[in-house]
Image (cartoon, grey):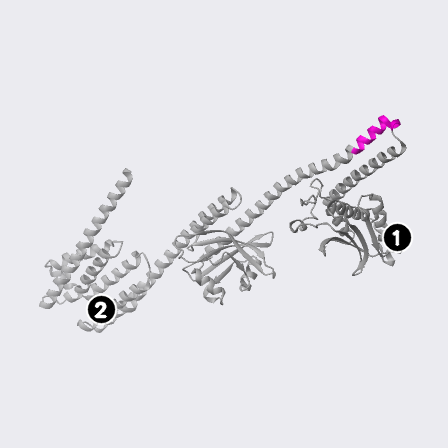
Amino acid sequence: MESARSDDARRIGTHRYRTAALVTALAGGFFGAVAELGTWIDGASNSSWARLPAFVIIAVTAGYQLLRSRRTEAPVVIAGLTFACLSLVEIKQMNDYDSGNTLAFLILLSVIYVTTRETQTRKPLIVGSGLIALFTIVSALIEDQPASQAVAKLLVGIPGQMLVIWIIWRLINSLGEASRLESNRARVQEALAACSQALLVGHDAEPLSAALAALLDATEADHVYIEVNGVNEGGQPTWEVVVEATGDNVPPGPSAFGNGDYQQFEEVTGLLASGHPARVRVADLALPVRARYEAEGIQSELMAPIMVRGQWLGTLGYSDFWRDDAWTDVEVEALMRAAEMVAAYWERERAREGLVELAKSKDRFIAAVSHELRTPLAGVVGFSGELAENLDTYSRDEILEMVGLISSQSREVAQLVDDLLTAERAASGNLTVNPTVIDMLEETRSIVESLRVDTEVRVEGDVIDVWADTLRTRQIVRNLLTNAHRYGGNTVRVEVSMRDGLALLIVFDDGNGVPGIDAEHIFDPYYRSFSEDSRPDSVGLGLAVARQLARLMNGDLIYRRLGGWTRFELTLPIATEHARSLATAL
C-alpha cells in the first residue's frame, strides 16, 4: 500500500514538473518571438528575422507537447529558455546571429524529433524538412550575401538536411525494428515455454486450452484454434474446431467456422497435407466462402498442420481480424513449433489411452480365457472323476454319453489353446503355413461333422481344389462355424464356389448380424461384441485368427450383411497344375 502511494506521489510530482517546464518553454518561445518581431519591425536589428522562426517553432513545439504528447523533450525546453533569455537581454554579440544559426538550430531540432519520437511516421518529417528547405530559400533571397555563401546555404539547407534527417530516421527505424523483433522473439519463447509446460501436464482438452491461451501472447492476432480433420460422405477433407481461445479485441459477430470442408481450399489443403504452413487472405477468396469470413470479420488466417507420424490429423491456426496477411516469420515459426507440440501431445495421449485400453483388454482377456477354460475343464474333470469313482454304477449308454461330453469339452479346450498359440505366433512373426491341394467342399463337410453342434449346418456348392494349409484351413472354417453357432440365428449354411479366379467359401446365418460400431472391429484380436445375442464371455480371438491365417495363405476374410443374412466370405487361391504336381511330388 505504501509503495502504491509513493508511486502515485512520484507520478503526480513528475506531471507537475513537466507542466511547469513546458509552460516555461512556451512562454519563453512566445515572448522571444514577440521581442524579435518588434526588433525586426523597428529595424533595430537586421538578424531579428532570422531568429524569429526559431522562437516560433519552440513555442509551437512546447504547446503541442503540453496539449497532446506524453513525452517532454528536454532539449526543446532548454532551447526555448536559452533563446528567450538571449532575446530579452541587450547583448551586442546577438547581432552576429544570422539565418545560418537558425538553419543549424532547425536541423538540430529535427534530429532531436526523429531520435526521441515514440512512433516513427514519415508525414511529420516531410513537413518539417519542407519547412527547413523553404526557410533556406527565403533566407538566400532576402539576405545580402556572396553567391558562394548562398549556394553553400542552399546545399546545406535543402539536400543536406534531407539526407541527414533521412539517414537518422532510417537508422532509428532499423534499431526500433530490431528491438521489436527481439522483443517479439522473447515473447514467443515465453509463450512456447508456457505452451510446452501446459501440454506436459494434464489430459484431455484442458492442456490444449491453456496452450492456446499462451499462444495468444505470441502474436498480434486475437483468435487461435485447433481443428481436427475428418472426411465427409463425398470423401472431401473436413475440419471441426475442438478448442479455441479468443482475445479482447475480436469484433462482435457470428461464429461461422465451427466446422466445414476444404472444398475451396485446394492450395491450402495441399500445403497442410505436405507439412507446410498455409496463409489465407480473405480478399483473394471467391464467394461464397469469402462471405463467411467477412461475416465474422476475419481478414486473414495463418495455419500450421498437426502432423502425427507423417499424417495430417488437424490444424493449429491464427485468425486475424485487423491485419491483411501481415504474418511475420517469427509468428509462422512459432505456430509451426506449437503445432509440433500439439502433435506430440496427441501422440502421447493416444499412446496413454492405448496403454489404458491394453490393460483393460488384458483383464478382459484373462477373465474370458479363464471362463472359457473353466467351463469345459469343469465338465472334463467332473465327468472323468465320476467315471473313475463310480464306473460300475452306470450303463454302457450313460458311459458313452459322458465320454462323448468329455471328448467335446476337451476338443473345445484344444481349439481355444490352438487359437491362442496361433495369435501369439502371428504377433511375433513366427506363424508359417504348409500349403497343399485341398478339396474345399469335402473338407468343409468333414469339419461340420466333427463339430457336432446342435444347429443343423447345410453344406453345398462346387468341388473346388484350393492351394492351402490343411490344418490352418480347418481352423478357419471351424472358427467361422463356431462364430455362427454362438452369435448367429437358427439357420446356418455354407456355400463353396468360385469368384474372380479364387475359391470362395461363404458361411451364412440368419441372426441379427453385427452392430455397426462392432463391424469395424470384429477382426481385431480379443475384441468381443456386446450385443444382446452374443456371449460376453468369449475370448474374441477366433475371427482375428481366421483372417490372419487367410491372408497368410494369400486369401482374405470379410464380413457382409446382405438380404437379412450375415455372411463371412473366405477366399483362397485355386490349386494350379503346378501346385498339383508339386503336391504329388511331396
The residue that disc 2 covers is 135
Q: Earlier in the sequence, mark 1 or mark 2?
A: 2
Q: Does 385 appear in magenta?
A: yes
Q: Quadrant of residue 67?
A: bottom left
The residue at the point 34 percent across, 62 percent down is 167
Q: Is residue 258 visible?
A: yes
Q: Does 258 appear in magenta?
A: no
* Magenta part, dominant SS: helix
Image vertical order of residue 457 relative to residue 409, above or below: below
Residue 99 in picture, x, y percent from top left: 19, 66
The residue lying toward the viewer, choosing from 280 and 472, is 472
Residue 307 in picture, x, y percent from top left: 57, 53
The residue at the point 80 percent across, 31 percent down is 381
Circle 1: residue type: Ala
Estimate the spatial distance between the alpha carbons at disc 1 and disc 2, rounded to whole Å: 112 Å
Q: Is residue 439 visible?
A: no
| In front: label 1 or label 2 | 1
- Indicate left or right for 421 with 109 as reference: right
Residue 1 in picture, x, y percent from top left: 29, 38
Circle 2: residue type: Phe
- Indicate left or right for 25 with 372 as reference: left
Marker count (numbered): 2
The residue that disc 1 covers is 583
Residue 377 in picture, x, y percent from top left: 78, 34
The residue at the point 20 percent across, 52 percent down is 19
**Pointer 2: residues within 10 angstroms few (<14), some, or many (20+)?**
many
